[in-house]
Image: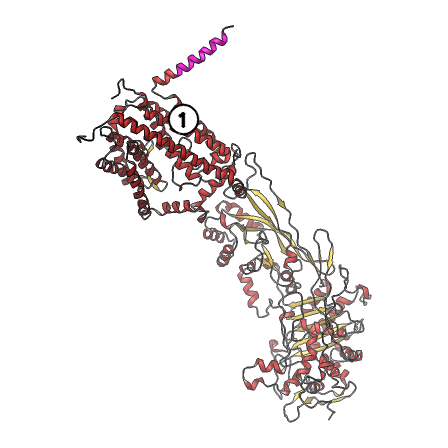
Amino acid sequence: MARGVHIKDHWSEQRLFDQRAIVAGAIIILFTLGLLGRLFLLQVIRHDYYADLSQGNRVRTEPIPAARGLILDRQGEVVAGNQPAYQLELVPEEVPNLKAALDGLVQLDLIRAEDVDELKKTIRSRRAFDSVPVRLRMSDEDVGKFAVRRFEFQGVDIRTRQTRSYPNGDMGVHALGYVGAISEADLSHIDRAAYSGTFLIGKQGVESAYETKLHGVNGSRELLVNAQGRSVDKQGAFIPTLNTHAPTAGDDIVLAMDLKVQRAAEDALAGRRGAVVAIDPNNGDVIAMTSRPGFDPNMFGRGITRAEYGALKDSIDTPLLDRAMRGVYPPGSTVKPVIALAGLAYHLVDPDQTRFCAGQFHLPGSAHLYREGKGGHHGWMNLVEAIAKSCDVYFYSLADTIGVDRIAAFMSPFGFGRTTGLDISGELKGLLPTREWKASYFKRPADKMWFPGETVNFGIGQGYLNVTPLQMAHYVSVLASRGKVWKPRLVTGFRDALSGRLEPLAPVREPDVTLATPEEWSRIYAGMVGAVTHGTAAGAVGKNAAYPIAGKTGTAQVFSVGQNEKYNEKTVSERLRDHSWFIAFAPADQPRIALAVIVENGGWGASAAAPIARKVLDAYLLGDDGKLKPSGAIGRSILPTTKPVEPPQAPVPGQKRADTGPIDSAGGVKSPP
Amino acid sequence: MIYEEVTTGSRTRRTLTGAARVLFALKLDGPLIIGLALVAVYGLIILYSASGQSAPTIYRTLGRLALGTIAMLVLAQVNPNFLRRTSPWLYAIGVFLLFIVYGMGHIGKGAQRWLDLGIIRFQPSELMKLAVPMTVAWFLHDRALPPRWPTLLLLTAMILLPVGLVAIQPDLGTAALIAIAGALVIVMAGLSVRIMGGLMAVGVAGAWFGWNFMHDYQRKRVLTFLDPQTDPLGAGYHIIQSQIAIGSGGVFGKGWMNGSQAQLELLPERSTDFIFAVVGEEFGLLGQGLLLLLYLFVVSRALYLSTQTQDTFARLVAGSLALTFFVYVFINAGMVSGLLPVVGVPLPLVSYGGTSVVTLLAGFGILMALYSHRKLVSS
């Protein structure tokens, strides 16, 4: 360059270059040391941390679902079991395009187009590496259909899984409940980790209430996987120890239910709408509990279709409704025994004194007539006969004498107006009306007043009083055991699936209902036995019974009859007919079973419900020879008996509260006109 | 028979002397050749494991090594003066080809980098890795050193033109390497420390400015480098998995072909950009240390040779090639071990694929030519 001061000096340039080369060499060594330092940090200082991560990277834990516990009846017969089935499962993180995969399955007719949205929701709510079932219980044809197209569906595969099977179909379905695919709602109240690998969950009844017992503990197995999550056999000489934790099968559940009795109840109810609940008054065991019509729980296990579910849901016969504990009806005349007991307890009635039944009753100062339900008149009646013949007029006047609040206070310990404490959820309370209830329930001031006429109706189980069949059976059970209150229960114990060891649950006793003298109970029994031998139910129940039965008919109005009309069963359309009730316990002298039967729109109590009750009683009490079984053979269970859990002693209603309750009208027993 | 041992001993000496003579005749440097060969053999061993025991991969790599060796042998014979004179032409052709790639480049891997010549696909950016430092050295050869401002500005433009063309392909890694190769020539030519400091300050400002012009995936790489855990299954996956591979290897490694990260394909790009992690997983700290020492040996030998050359062009080109080689190693090892952001720079002579092996060996061929064609009298 032509720049005077700046000429090329080869020696100094060489020296400059050599200096820079030395500096560069030094920097290179420094940088290499830096790299080695970094590697030292990773490989020596943090080695354990990364070794753990690497182990987690290549070992995947796969859940082994535990076998769900069986459900057995009291004799050990299987009511709900397990059975292997093919199902289609999808692992979200392995599916490249979820929408395309689901659409493809719809095209193969393996899932329904209308279910896709719901499925997507479920899939999104599960963890990405969890297998989600998209189609349960595939037929052989479906399996074949999918198998040939399998390569198109990455992340979707057929698996063999245990599914739930109910060999008796719809028998006892409401009490048993059913299992179905785990929904988004279920996920909110279960431990997801514990349910990893589980596909079905109890949805109702025993299946749901005892879910934790039935579910068991899932096991796990460690697998060597590659980056795609595919299982590989081995890689190189480094085989990590792969742990396997065996699952613990869920406990089997032993029901109080006696399948023979249950079957008898359902056969007797076949084709009708209604419910039967039978309880052992000595421990609260629910011998039979049915609501008809029912539905097949197997449908839910295999994945119910929208159409099927819609048909069940919208059916006019409401098969999904558990009438036994969620159906509420006025009890009708079945309430009379407890009203009579209240009269005795409050000393407001002399059982031997007779009253005259002229077929109608009116309150003083009122023109309103309260008629005898079946028409006609009974003439002179004492307490026992009034129960046996179900004399409405007698109870109109008795109820009016006792007063609503005292009746309610007396009835409450029998389980009216509150849940009985059955060991599955969903029970309704019904309604036990009081003045206070009416004042708070109604909005209009005019409606808040309790009218004396409402008390009169209360006496024959009409009006606001509402009960469930379960409550009625419970009430009969308390009646039959002379005041012992047992919590009704479907489940009486568990069986360890591995060892077969039985673990009975102690029955739970609640505070007794006590009366002044045992005599008072006997009066009521006499009335109820009378109803069966020569009273309202004589023809329908009492004929040729091998054991004494105490019973009471009831008729719950659906359709109110005008003042001067007469209810005529034939002219009223089927759905508007009265509900038919029957309650009973037997043998009357040493009760072993207490039951309540309701037949919706069955008409008069004795005609529809009473024969059903007899069949149920026979099924439980009679041997194959048609004779009453010896005491020890009735209701035998595979479980050993246990000492009951005694109740905390609580104040006893009846005597103590006799003076405190308000009185509707002038006390004392009305003298016959 | 009695003289056998003596004869053998002298034969050994004769053989060594003979080898030296052959190398001298071929214009090659013995230590450098041995260093490169050791790295290549080490590379083949680890590649066999990293590729999942794929023989075709090894054959293709051997083919490329052979091609590179031929390029090295041929270039070593070329007279440095001829190299110097052709440098600007190489540069011109390279820039022209980059323009063509920019205009109608073949689409490969979502980026336009290739030029399809029918028989082979050619990356003009590879050519620029050699052409840029050579041209800068050519420009400085006749000028007094250290370079002055006008020269510096001109050289900056000369470097940035191809760098820009490569960067918009977009191939940020290669662009950076070309820029570094060119810049190293200027640094070795005696760029004042003050200017270097100033440039560093400008660089920081430029980084901020460049951030705004980066593609999303490039930004993501930078962000992921700063905190890999932010995107463990996306861009951060590479870094996390490679650190797990290296860290779990420990001091002695899991053994050849026993690296679970590599063998179970948990480590992405295991035989290409992230092969250094496989070295770490299977051969541990010792294996990686050994490889780094081999590289250090090659670089320092190359740097030593550059000081032994006899003119400015030779010194600058040789120095730049030696240092660029180290930059490759440092960027790749730094990236794989989580010191530097993820940029697509292969581990020289070890990573599988691409034409970089050929370019690298060609570079060493040039370096040896510059060293071994000695003038009788120093200029």
SS at mark 1 in the image: helix
Colour basis: secondary structure
Q: Which residues are magenta?
A: B1-19
Residue B100 placement, left or right of A585: left
**Viewer-nearest residue: B377 or A236:** B377
Q: Position of residue A136 (x, y in %)?
A: 57, 54
Q: From the image, tell me which residue sits under label 1.
A: B36
| Residue A35 percent across, percent down from the top left | 43, 36
Residue B127 in which image quadrant? top left
Residue A428 sits in quarter: bottom right
Closer to the camera, B22 or A536? B22
Q: Residues within 10 Å of mark 1 (few under 14, many from 20)?
A: many
Given residues B309 and B358, the one toward you in this image is B309
Question: Is B17 part of what is drawn in magenta?
Answer: yes
The answer to whether residue A158 is seen in the rendering is yes
Q: Amino acid at mark 1?
A: Leu
Chain label for disc 1: B
Task: Give residue A196's position: percent from left, percent from top.
Answer: 57, 52
Q: Residue at x 67, y 77 (%)?
A: A331
State whether the magenta stretch is mostly helix, strand or loop.
helix
Q: Decide: is A111 above or below A441.
A: above
Q: Name above or below for residue A432 compared with residue A270.
A: below
Does residue B316 show up? Answer: no
Q: Quadrant of the C terminus of chain B?
A: top left
Residue at 78%, 67% (x, y): give it. Answer: A621
x then y, percent, for residue A267: 69, 66
Residue at figure coordinates x 55%, y 68% from the top left: A314
Query: Taking B277 as reference, is B197 left or right?
Result: left
Q: Is residue A518 left or right of residue A35?
A: right
